Amino acid sequence: MGIERTFSIIKPDATRRNLTGKINAMFEEAGLRIVAQKRAHLTKAQAETFYAVHAERAFFNDLVSFMTSGPVVLQVLEGEDAIAKNREVMGATNPATADEGTVRKLYGESVEANSVHGSDAPETAAEEIAFFFAGAEIVG
Ligand code: CMP
């Protein structure tokens, strides 16, 4: 696959429990490099736009409320096969079915408060990175 970049969010349930460092250590131990990172409190408009693909889903309003309920950490992760590798480290969307040792199994509280988001494909990674980061903020 070669060197890729993916977009990651450490979600409000994780920042609330002060887990940023523990989650970042898991990314780094998996060979992912944090090449951009900033803490932010998303606006409703940002969360709605970011998750627009889910706008018709029953959980959309709750998802937007949750993602604006506290600070998040926005990140760009870089490494060999970074998109798939990050998804492995995160585990399944629902912490109840996530593999042992994954971020969501260790720290996720529910399918909504599942501690992390990661891009699912190269096109979405590029879009999501560009939505939150200027090129000059990413230092590989
Ligand atoms: P994420 O990877 O951030 O992408 C969309 C999010 O919607 C997902 O993680 C979940 O946290 C959240 N979500 C809330 N309810 C559901 C649900 N029923 N099915 C899938 N995702 C859900």
Image (cartoon, rainbow, N blue to C red):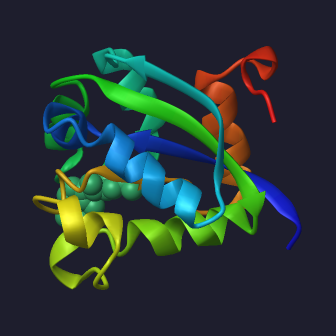
Q: What quarter of the picture does the C terminus occupy?
A: top right
Specify whether residue 94 is in view. Answer: no
The image position of residue 90, as x and y in percent, is 41, 65
Picture coordinates of residue 138 (x, y %)?
75, 26
Picture quadrant of ligand 1: bottom left
Please state the total of marks drawn on the protein image: 0
Decide: is 127 above or below 124.
above
In depth, the one of 78 and 94 nearer the eye is: 78
Kindly identify the residue that appears in the image at 73 percent across and 43 percent down: 126
Would you identify the image quadrant in which residue 37 lies?
Answer: top right
Expressed as whole percent of the image width and height from the top left, the position of residue 79 reads 75, 58
Q: Position of residue 12 (x, y in %)?
A: 22, 34
Q: Quadrant of the N terminus?
A: bottom right
Determine the image quadrant of residue 30.
bottom right
Relative to 125, 20 lies left or right: left
Q: Is residue 93 above or below residue 113?
A: below
- Front residue of 46/117: it is 117
Q: Is residue 76 left or right of residue 112?
A: right
Q: Is residue 52 above or below residue 30?
A: above
Q: Residue at x 78, y 28 (%)?
A: 139
| Residue that protrudes farthest toward the right in the picture | 2
The residue located at (61%, 70%) in the rendering is: 85
Q: Answer left or right for 47 relative to 138.
A: left
Q: Nearer the viewer, residue 21 or 81?
A: 21
Res 12 visible = yes
Q: Nearer the viewer, residue 66 or 76?
A: 76
Residue at the spot 33% in from the left edge and 64% down from the top edge: 103
